[in-house]
Image (cartoon, rainbow, N blue to C red):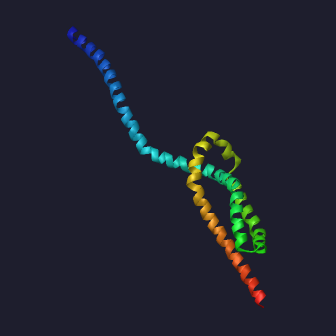
Amino acid sequence: MYPHNTHSHALLNAHSHALFNAHSHALLNAHSHAHLNALLNAHSHALFNAHSHALLNAHSHAHLNALLNAHSHALFNAHSHALLNAHSHAHFNALLNAHSHALFNAHSHALLNAHSHALLNAHSDALFNAHSHALLSAHSHALFNAHSHALLSAHLTDLSRLTTSDSFLCDQ
């Protein structure tokens, strides 16, 4: 082997590694952000959907219980006065005795038993505070409207039956 060839191979080895290192880092710096952005665009919606449903399942019942505790007295007072003005005290008391305890027990125990205290302890107050306002504003009105209309229509139907049966007896 000629000395010239040995020297040229050594120069090629020395320069090729230096060039490779210089260009590979430049290419990595130039393309890594593009790849990261592409990955984020491809996966962020899937990740968001996966985590948001998990967070909703973990926190929604806690939010519902907080809403019930915060609003139940105000809602009860607002609706009870309207019902008392529309119907007699006897009918209202009969409906309350027949239905309120059963409905409250059925829903509250089901909600409490469905999600354990371990879920509440597993997620920190920081997560709760970050998501609670958004979740409350998004879900509370829809949930309240769905349940309140159903409950009012059920109670008003019972009241109508009681009123009709009383007037029938009075006519006799």
**Is 2 placed above or below 142 here?**
above
In the image, 82 versus 149, the foreground residue is 82
Q: Is residue 124 visible?
A: no
At 41% across and 36% down in the image, what residue appears?
36
Counting labels gives 0
Quadrant of the rendering where the C terminus is positioned: bottom right
**Is 118 placed above or below 109 here?**
above
At 65% across and 42% down in the image, what residue appears?
122
At 28% across and 16% down in the image, what residue appears?
15
**Is 25 placed above or below 3 here?**
below
In the image, 23 versus 17, the foreground residue is 23
Q: Position of residue 104 (x, y in %)?
A: 73, 62
Residue 3 occupies quadrant: top left
Q: Is residue 153 visible?
A: yes
Name of the residue lying farthest toward the top: 3
Q: Position of residue 60 (x, y in %)?
A: 62, 52
Left of 65 or right of it: where is 17?
left
Residue 165 occupies quadrant: bottom right
Residue 97 occupies quadrant: bottom right
Q: Position of residue 1 (x, y in %)?
A: 22, 11
Left of 45 or right of it: where is 172?
right
Q: Position of residue 157 (x, y in %)?
A: 67, 76
**Is 22 placed above or below 94 here?**
above
In the image, 49 versus 17, the foreground residue is 49
At 31% across and 24% down in the image, what residue appears?
23
Name of the residue lying farthest toward the bottom: 172
